[in-house]
Amino acid sequence: MNQPQESFLKNDYLKVLKLISSDVFEPRLVRAILFVVFAVQLTASIITVRALLIKELTAKEFVLYGPVFFGCFYGMLAIYIIIFQSSFITNMSQELEMWSYSSGGEEINRRVKFQSRVITIYALVNFLLAIVASYLYFSPLDSDNETFYMVRFIEEKIPDYAKICKIAYRTTFLAMGYVMIVHSYQVIYASQHVRFQIIFFTEYVKKVVEFDEKISEECLFYNERFQTIVGKRLQNCVIRHIQFLKFDRIKIKEMSNLIAAFSLCGCLLGISISFYVLSGIFYREHFLRVALISVTAVSTFFALILAGQSMESKANSAHIIMNNIKWYNFNQSNKKAYLLLLMMSMKQYKIKFSENYSINYELGLTIVRGIYSIISVMANMHFDN
């Protein structure tokens, strides 16, 4: 295709986001550290489940330990994917041909650059919040044996080595908060680059019928040069659309699988936190921890929803623009190519993780309503008792 290309790796406007969410985990040493964190957290989870099964831990006590227990499952899933599955954004430029930022024109380039800066600033601020929240969970509090079952287990079972074991266990939380936002960042990175490419493609589509000769519209049908130029442009549009569909079939499916798995863990975490809050046992010293981790989680969730919706909206916009092409001056061959392009563009381009749900505003409203309903029911049950 006659579109300007450039070295994507050197000119990636979202390279900071890629560094945070993917590149930093490439060294083997980092993966080895994460493997140790995973092993420690898995051991702690097994010990907690065992205590629950043999009734060393009552259901009422488990409500207090639930937020950390289920939160660690979320973090362990993130670490498992980082270690055992290569990042789906590592070779993104090889799986979807990246048009140059300049291909949409100077105004589009400025707009994309500004949006990329906003995304980068958000990512850095949210990243710092996650790091601070992780540090707060690393810092010991007097009531931690009522929040972390592993702390209680260490104090009761191995008191002679309690100090060193608790430090080793707490140290793993320095990584947990970070890894819990990594895959959301990867989805944001991939979806926004796809959105940028759709924007560039849309600008190309707008120029399909542009012609440099001054000729009446009625004569365009008989102008061979016009038909040749249009035919070439339509061919390029079809080729580009095939590239989008291929990327959608492979990478969007990967993103969807990630979202489904993390949604399940997130729901369990949210329910456990609700039980914990409604239990009535809430220490003031935990407020900053809970507040920071909640702000980070909500911020990441809404950024993910916005990223998915923005990509979907641009794809719908591209479809509308293709429908508005003045096709009535095309010859028979170009009409067939245009019809093929329209048929291909009918496929909805969205990050779906089930038959009925995809990452967009509708999903956000559904989840908010669901959480509100669960909290309302639980609150009524709590106050009735």
Image (cartoon, rainbow, N blue to C red):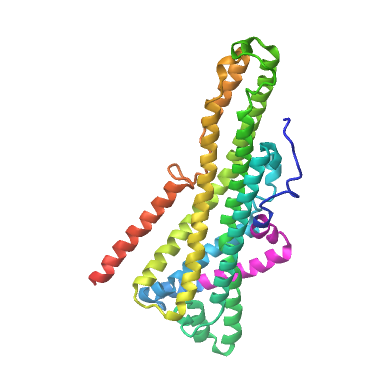
As drawn, which residue projects farthest toward the front? 214
Is residue 313 covered in magenta?
no
Position of residue 223 measured from the top left corner of the image (x, y, whole percent): 67, 11
Asked if residue 356 lies left or right of residue 381, the reply is right
The residue at 51%/31% (across/down) is 320
Position of residue 72 measured from the top left corner of the image (x, y, whole percent): 52, 67
* Quadrant holding the C terminus: bottom left
Do we see residue 68 in this rendering?
Answer: no
Question: Which of the 4 image quadrants contains residue 249?
Answer: top right
Q: Is residue 151 above or below residue 31?
A: below
Position of residue 170 measured from the top left corner of the image (x, y, whole percent): 57, 77
Question: Which of the 4 image quadrants contains residue 27?
Answer: bottom right
Do we see residue 92 in this rendering?
Answer: yes
* Quadrant holding the N terminus: top right
The residue at 58%/75% (across/down) is 135
Residue 190 vs residue 279, the one in the foreground: 190
* Stretch in magenta: 18-45
Asked if residue 118 lies left or right of residue 25, the reply is left
Q: Is most of the magenta stretch helix, strand or loop?
A: helix
